[in-house]
Image: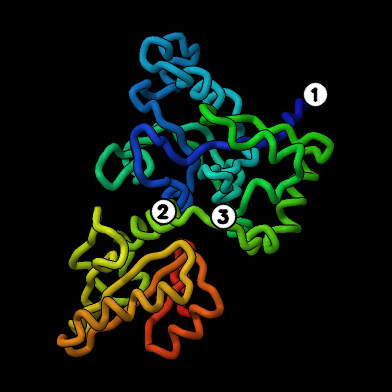
């Protein structure tokens, strides 16, 4: 019996829709273990495999994007979760068939969801994460960041699929620690969204009591919470936390110093060495968050 081996492909899929959503979905993709695209009104694509109905239900780049996601993406393909502004948030490998999912956070069309019902399971790598496309080989980097493209097949060029995969694996630490300017708003939004649901993973018994939105920086902390002992906990989220972030947390704590036991917490994707030193000096509790919380 002849066995036809399908060549593995590389896909870049954007994790946001600037027309509808303010917050980037990359962290939620990783949390739910999926990659996804929108146009949910097209319905379950498995019910009409010819896809003749798509142009009537969705416009713009919807039909071509849905067809590629449904028909061309396959198990073991490589996925680059592209968060915009030249940033690749995560790298993963497709681990399952297409599904139309409305129940998880990525798929449900609610205030805490994104409405991306067309999904595929993905095993997201722990690293590299949040790195600039400019750190990739030029022949690959120049294919990313094309406006108006939701899903795009990436040609690995002279590297080939395995060569590019090996490049990502062998340079994972260097890429993740490349020191580029991360998209502060995007990463902070992801941490805030995660913290709202999983505050007890930050600390057992921690409960969010108030979440601020739509206020200028430095006016109020992102969250007020109570710990297991009833103490007030002021939480500020950052993409990258530096010395200024520590002083900001101290400022918040001073505003509530009349309440005994008030604590100040900084939660960030990355923290600088200076930030860590200053935080320890002033008793500001510091955590790094990559869908888990690590005290530093």
Expressed as whole percent of the image width and height from the top left, the position of residue 46 reads 45, 22
First of labels 2, 1 by sequence position: 1
Expressed as whole percent of the image width and height from the top left, the position of residue 215 reads 24, 57
Graded by Cα atoms within 10 Å as few (under 14), some (14 to 19) or many (20 or more), the crowding at tag 1 reads few
Residue 228, by quadrant, is: bottom left
Give the label, 1 or 3, closer to the camera: 3
Measuring 37% from the left and 21% from the top, which residue is drawn there?
42
- Taking 202 as reference, is 261 above or below it? below
Q: Which residue is mark 3?
A: 130
Query: Which label number is shown at residue 66?
Result: none
Q: Which residue is mark 2?
A: 185
First of labels 1, 3 by sequence position: 1
Query: Which label number is shown at residue 2?
Result: 1
Mark 1–mark 3 distance (CA, rounded to whole Å): 42 Å
Left or right side of 220 for 154: right
- Callout 3 secondary element: strand
- Taking 177 as reference, is 32 above or below it? above
Left or right side of 205 for 278: right
Give the label, 2 or 3, closer to the camera: 2
């Amino acid at each position: 019996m002849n066995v036809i081996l399908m060549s593995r492909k590389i896909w870049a899929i954007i994790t946001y829709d600037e027309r509808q959503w303010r917050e980037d979905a990359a962290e939620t993709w990783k949390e739910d273990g999926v990659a996804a695209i929108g146009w949910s009104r097209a319905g379950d694509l498995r019910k009409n495999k010819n896809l003749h109905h798509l142009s009537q239900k969705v416009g713009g780049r919807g039909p071509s994007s849905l067809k590629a996601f449904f028909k061309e993406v396959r198990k073991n393909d490589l996925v680059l979760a592209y968060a915009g502004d030249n940033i690749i948030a995560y790298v993963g490998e497709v681990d399952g068939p297409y599904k139309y999912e409305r129940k998880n956070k990525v798929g449900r069309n609610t205030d805490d969801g994104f409405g991306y019902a067309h999904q595929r399971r993905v095993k997201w790598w722990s690293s590299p994460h949040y790195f600039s496309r400019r750190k990739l080989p030029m022949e690959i980097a120049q294919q990313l960041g094309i406006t108006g493209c939701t899903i795009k097949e990436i040609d690995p060029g002279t590297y080939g699929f395995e060569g590019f995969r090996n490049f990502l694996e062998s340079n994972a630490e260097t890429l993740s620690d490349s020191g580029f300017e991360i998209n502060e708003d995007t990463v902070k939004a992801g941490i805030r969204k995660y913290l709202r649901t999983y505050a007890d993973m930050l600390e057992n018994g921690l409960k969010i009591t108030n979440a601020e939105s739509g206020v200028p920086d430095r006016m109020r902390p992102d969250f007020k919470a109570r710990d297991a002992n009833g103490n007030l906990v002021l939480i500020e989220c950052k993409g990258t936390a530096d010395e200024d972030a520590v002083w900001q947390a101290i400022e918040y704590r001073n505003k509530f110093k009349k309440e005994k036991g008030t604590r100040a917490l900084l939660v960030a994707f990355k923290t600088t060495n200076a930030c860590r030193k200053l935080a320890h000096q002033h008793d500001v509790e510091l955590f790094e968050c990559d869908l888990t919380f690590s005290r530093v």
